[in-house]
Amino acid sequence: MTAESGPVPNSTTGYGVSLYVWRIPAVAIPAAMWRMAVDPRRVRREDGVRFVKLLGTGRGGEFGPTRADPTRWAALAVYDQARPGFAGWDRRAVASCRIDLAPLNARGSWAGREPFPITPAGSSGTNQPDGTTGGKAGGTDGPVLALTRARLRPTRAVTFWRATGPVAAAASEASGLLAAFGIGEAPLGWQGTVTVWRRAADLLRFAYRHPQHRQAIERTMTTGWYAEELFARFAVLDVVGDTGVIGWGSERHGAEKRSTRRPVDGGTIPNRRPR
């Protein structure tokens, strides 16, 4: 496994963040399970890698502990130098997508760490409605990606899953949503979400004005669902590969598989579906 050539880490934060997603054939599922077990340690040994997580995903845009998709897997990496490589996944994939990101704001921790620190030079010092601290890039007009990750308290899990259904259904029809899928740490399971939005304003409109989502935020503060939680927003710098893998358009497999780039100008990215 070797590092890829990649962009210079973000000038505001001093580091880079990339999300990788792969679609594999059913025959490769056993190999994928093995890679989920061994790849995190291998990638962490690469020079400049700060943080890495290998993740399972949900079917399509679905969320929930029984909706895992064993043919779609993901990795999230934070690095100081070149992007880490995932050659084993690339060889087995019938389609793949990589999204390069710049952190805008973040709150909380993941496995006891804060993987997306906003440096003082890049922070405006302003608090967002969800408690995150925004950086200078928080006003981006281009597409944004929102990441949530939580470790549920066992005694709160049932009430949590009952409450998320209406929110997930509402999110699937939200204006400006380009893609959405659930994520979970190895080997399977759902512990978070990834959503991609045309602009930050679309994300904020849904997060703080949609009644069901506002109610979920309020219940999070009063019910204590999470033993640990992380909420982060990113500017999308580059999108390379088959965006259908994340639910943004249709997937291209086999002979049609090729590397392409989505434009990241907020004015030219099409919606996931007509609105």
Image: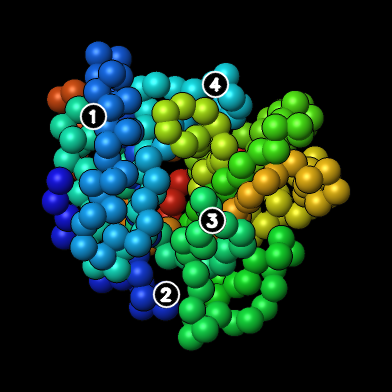
Mark 3 lies on residue: 112
Whichever of labels 4 and 1 marks the residue nearer the N terminus, that label is 4
In the image: residue 88, left or right of residue 262: left
Crowding near the residue tagged with mark 4, few <14, some 14–19, many ≥20 C-alpha atoms within 10 Å: some
Instruction: Report, in whole angstroms, how far the alpha carbon at label 2 lies from the one at label 4.
Output: 35 Å
Tell me which corner region of the image, top left, top right, bottom left or bottom right, holds residue 247: top left
Mark 2 burial class by Cα count in 10 Å: few <14, some 14-19, many 20+: many
Percent coordinates x, y for residue 89 in the rendering: 23, 35
What residue does disc 2 label? 13
**Looking at the picture, how far across and down is residue 244, in whole percent?**
37, 33
* Labels 4 and 3 touching (C-beta < 8 A): no
Residue receiving disc 4: 67
Q: Looking at the image, is mark 1 or mark 2 earlier in the sequence?
A: 2
Q: How far apart are marks 4 and 1 (CA)?
A: 21 Å
Return the disc, 2 or 3, that comes first in the chain's sequence: 2
**Quarter-of-image position of residue 201:** bottom right
| SS at badge 3 | loop
> Closest to the observer: 200 or 80?
80
- The part of the image, by quadrant, that contains residue 25 is top left
In the displayed structure, would residue 188 be above or below residue 148?
above
Residue 42, x across and y down, in percent: 23, 46
**As rendered, which of 201 and 88 lies closer to the eye?**
88
Q: Residue shown at 56%/66% (left/top)?
A: 105
